[in-house]
Image (tube, rainbow, N blue to C red):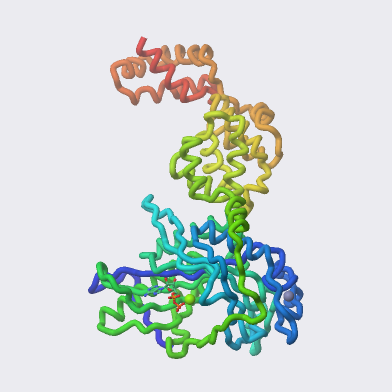
Amino acid sequence: MERVGPAAGMTTKTDYEMVVGLEVHCQLATRTKLFCACGTDGFGETANTRVCPVCTGQPGTLPVLNKRAVELAFQAALALDCRLAEESVFARKNYFYPDLPKAYQISQYERPFSTDGGLDVALKDGRVKRVRIHRVHLEEDAGKLLHEIGSKRLDYSLVDFNRGGAPLIEIVSEPDLRSSEEAYAYLTALKEVLQHAGCSRCDMEKGEMRCDANVSLRARGRGELGTRAELKNLNSFKGVKDALEYEFRRQAALLDSGRRVVQETRLWDAQRQETRSMRSKEEAHDYRYFPDPDLAPLRAAPEWVAALKASLPELPAAKRQRFQSQHALSAYDASVLASDRELAEYFERALSGLPGGAKTLANLVINELLGKLNAEKMTAGRCPVPAESLGELARLVQAGTLSSKGAKDVLARMWESGKPAAVLVAELGVSQVSDDAQLRDWIEQALRAQPQAAADLKSGKERAIGSLVGVVMKLSKGKANPARVNVLIKEAVSR
Ligand code: ADP
Ligand code: MG
Ligand code: ZN
């Protein structure tokens, strides 16, 4: 086994550009498998409890296509701007492996159901890059091999067919990605779109989203593509990023020393943070694909496709745009709130009845609520604080009754007790004084107590306002609304 591991932070002789194309498998959110009535809920359940003669490849059985899986697959392709084929064909991909009892996987090959799409990917620097999608096809999943129980390594293997026959789509990108960060951003965008559209839950921990990465290098500015390696066993977005960065260093070292990159499949070892050769092109499988005689060609009637398109929910990119224009949010706030469908729905429910309060509410959601949800690994749909209550809290902040610090305390109590905002404000005694008459009274006292600061401020020394605000806060026992106090002090000294 070959291992080349150049140190991180290496410099290369040539300025290389990374070229990446990703092949992503996502499990469709159906109740049952692609060709039988077995449940898709077998993850983490007792092995081989979601099986039948069809998905275990017994002789004499026939596949029956799951209509819901086809609907979700087509919706996913529509969400990815793909062209849908009026007719597509299921093919048998033949190979022998213990997780595949039929010795062939039902997939699509020469005639996939969709091609030529694209996904808009938001990059860190604020640019949006369109990554072309080469094709999306339907296929069934294989079973899962187990080589250990707990931490005990077995000297034999076990096989669990619970996920064998589960419905998948494979999404193949064009080699349009140019860095590990772009690959990461693409996966994030893809997950957001598929989750929003309700096509897949994309839960990586359950294996509902899996990715292979193809990567090659070329001298920057060169047109033709270099020889690629295909990376497998990437179990997280972070894993994809790390593996690509390792592979960049490995391939750059080879090319710099005048050697060649061989086309091969390599396995990512997350523990050792390196890739290892698994099989070369010469050892690649010949799958002997042919159309599956058990399944008729899949025909998509235009009216049916139109109805699917009409039933697609608003997707993240459109939602982001709308949040910016309709609610006057910043690009950042809009992208955070639109990234998750439940969160976006929660936000908009909280916002109804709070005209003009979008920014205040966005701050509360992004700065306070999200942290709590993440800490509890909870989705917005299961948030213990009802959206209406958070809206009420934002209204109190907007009216100046509550400081943002006070709002944070109230929110913490709301999370635990579920009590309405107004009740907790009274209970905690955190309401702010925004009444001008009362504030002016304290300000007069402050100006008398600190004549020097008053004079300094009057002569234009802005910083002098700090000590005056300090006196007012003391007099008010911390309850004066500091923003309003600032305004009123300036008014007072300019008289
Ligand atoms: P295969 O038929 O071996 O699966 P494909 O042509 O379907 O190969 O490509 C598979 C993936 O590899 C696609 O995502 C594609 O964008 C990517 N790819 C192809 N050539 C290169 C290359 N030279 N460098 C990086 N990625 C590549
Ligand atoms: Mg391929
Ligand atoms: Zn079955």
Quarter of the rendering containing residue 255: bottom left
| Residue 31 shown left or right of residue 353 in the figure | right
Q: Quadrant of the N terminus?
A: bottom left
Residue at coordinates 54% horizontally, 61% vertically from top-left?
Answer: 77
Relative to 294, residue 11 above or below:
above
Front residue of 92/259: it is 92
Which quarter holds ligand 3?
A: bottom right
Q: Position of residue 28 (x, y in %)?
A: 62, 64
Relative to 437, residue 465 above or below:
below
Q: Position of residue 44 (x, y in %)?
A: 70, 70
Q: Residue furthest left?
A: 13
Residue at coordinates 39% horizontally, 69% vertically from top-left?
Answer: 175
Q: Quadrant of the C terminus?
A: top left
Q: Position of residue 407 (x, y in %)?
A: 58, 34
Quarter of the rendering containing residue 104: bottom right
Quarter of the rendering containing residue 391: top right
Residue at coordinates 73% horizontally, 87% vertically from top-left?
Answer: 59
Q: In this figure, what is the number of numbered marks? A: 0
Q: Residue furthest top?
A: 495
Residue 374 visible to the viewer: no
Front residue of 262/442: it is 262
Residue at coordinates 26% horizontally, 68% vertically from top-left?
Answer: 220
Residue 153 visible to the viewer: yes
Q: Position of residue 20 (x, y in %)?
A: 40, 69
Relative to 183, residue 471 above or below:
above
Front residue of 84/495: it is 84
